Image (cartoon, coloured by chain):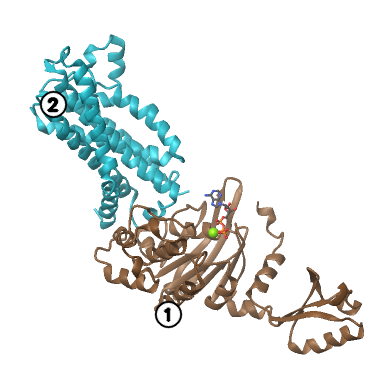
Amino acid sequence: MSRGFVTLLYKEVLRFWKVSFQTVGAPVLTALLYLMIFSHVLESHVQVHGVPYGAFLIPGLVIMSALQNAFANSSSSLIQSKVTGSVVFVLLPPISYVEFFLAYVVAAMLRGMMVGVGVLAVTMWFAPLTFVAPQWILLFIALGGGIMGTLGMIAGIWADKFDQLAGFQNFLIMPLTMLSGVFYSIHSLPEFWQLVSRFNPVFYMIDGFRFGFFGVSDVAPEISLTVVMASFLAVSAATLVLLRSGYKLRS
Amino acid sequence: MDAMSVAVAIDRVEKRFASLRALAGVSLQIAEGEFFGLLGPNGAGKTTLISCLAGLVRPDAGALSVMGHDVVTDYREARRRLGVVPQELVFDPFFSVRETLRIQSGYFGIRKNDDWIDEILANLDLTSKAEVNMRRLSGGMKRRVLVAQALVHKPPVIVLDEPTAGVDVELRQGLWQFVRRLNQDGHTVILTTHYLEEAEALCGRIAMLKQGHVVALDTTRNLLAGVAGQTLQLRLAGSQPLPPALGARATESDGNWIFHLAGLDEIEPLLAALREGNCVIDDLRLTQSDLEDVFLGVMQNSGSAHEGGR
Ligand SMILES: Nc1ncnc2c1ncn2[C@@H]1O[C@H](COP(=O)(O)OP(=O)(O)OP(=O)(O)O)[C@@H](O)[C@H]1O
Ligand SMILES: [Mg+2]
């Protein structure tokens, strides 16, 4: 990888790190509030997969926060530099579209993982967590962040205005992440909604991620991994095609 | 111009934006070491041409190269050799001036660049602002940072798209001194500006663009030779008419009569004719013809020749 790529990645990380109070701190606080409210209300009544509800909820909150922030990172960085025009600074140098893609996606992954670690660090004290298979934990948060970072790139490239981006976020990303088993096991859903959930790739990210903690899940982690990898490849290919064509970046 | 010495080659470049023909087949060759001016009215296609050269805009037809490297097929090498100061005043609000320049160096593959960055900062009178966030700079200072950003990788070809818009007089002088020195050191400089006296003073050769066509291309000296002479402006008292003998030679603007003279010896007969017609002169001004006259002449004469292109 060229120095240009390394610098672009560094710049993308520095961009959110300089305002980490908002980009990492705020989502951690939000997740903590979710946990306190939901687990307080439901703790005594509910167990999922034999796991107390509070413990079940934590991995869901961790990866949901990670996914939403990975998306936010690449999409907001791109739209901001497009709107202000400073995107020329990354279009003028000898950086290939593949390097461009990787820099934004890896930065989004890192932001997602930092938020995830932050959420885990503040929530893990509230419920008995286990870490049965940490390799799955890492794998799913990384791939999930990659997918969301890539979707964020597509949204950031496509949107001309901030409200278009907000639309993408509110009508696609939020429903996908919320309706994916963060707050429940899909086995507790009616038949029809179980079926719908199985078409949501975010469901597999969360299910596989949770497997890493408890060793139990709605579907086998290998299946989740396959779906998540295939989704990552699909959205990456689409984004690379966009970038190569210069869509909205090089007129 | 032999192949070795060509810094920028632009070959029949066309670009449309929807139904608008921004570039209608532009060809130019700029030699290494030239100080080249790209002039034209608003919307002539100057920025579009520069953007094609920089890879920001993809031409519909034609080819461009920088130091022999095609800007599409060999874009890495081409971009390494090109520094562009964009026309729009853009900046990244997250970083300080120094951070901005370090990051820009990194994009071009340069790791330790602080010596050169310090030199650029000094030359652009930005040293005291090095650690200041971009947001806290004035407009003119931001423009200077844009110039600095274009220079971090010491590009052999430097393109400045209206670099002096909004820059104060003192810095403008300093900027030109710096750019001139870079040019003397062998950098090829391409400049667009609406300040024609700047172009006249700096550029060895000039292309004029109108509606996507090159309508004039020559050395500054030759272009000026075409309008050699002086312009005489005079106003008559009480809005008297000119004597018929002179009326045909003059053009009127705002109550002023304007005469183009081939030489100073034409003044005496002109004044004599006025005296004979009992005209009383209220105001009289004599100016040397300059690039502005050339520019206006070229733009008028190339009038509708290309209108069909739309
Ligand atoms: N991205 C774009 N989309 C649509 N039209 C464009 C675009 N960029 C430029 N144009 C049009 O192309 C024409 C040439 O524009 P360009 O910016 O190259 O002019 P210019 O010579 O740089 O003018 P100025 O002196 O005002 O900077 C203009 O009519 C402009 O409206
Ligand atoms: Mg322009």
Q: Mark yes or no: residue A233 visible.
A: no
Chain identity for the colour cyan used in the image: A
Residue A126, labelled with which disc? 2
The residue under label 2 is which amino acid type? Phe
Q: Identify residue for label 1.
A: B184
The residue under label 1 is which amino acid type? Gln
Q: Is residue B9 or residue B201 the one in the foreground?
A: B201
Q: Position of residue B20 (x, y in %)?
A: 61, 49
Q: Chain of mark 1?
A: B
Q: Is residue B97 or residue B67 the one in the foreground?
A: B97
Cβ atoms under marks 2 and 1 closer than 8 Å: no
Chain identity for the colour brown used in the image: B
A230 displayed left or right of B50? left
Mark 2 within 8 Å of ligand 1, using the beta carbon: no
Q: Classify mark 1: helix, strand or loop.
A: helix
Relative height, residue B31 to residue A213 (above, below): below
Q: Mark yes or no: residue B195 visible.
A: yes
Q: Nearer the viewer, mark 2 or mark 1?
A: 2
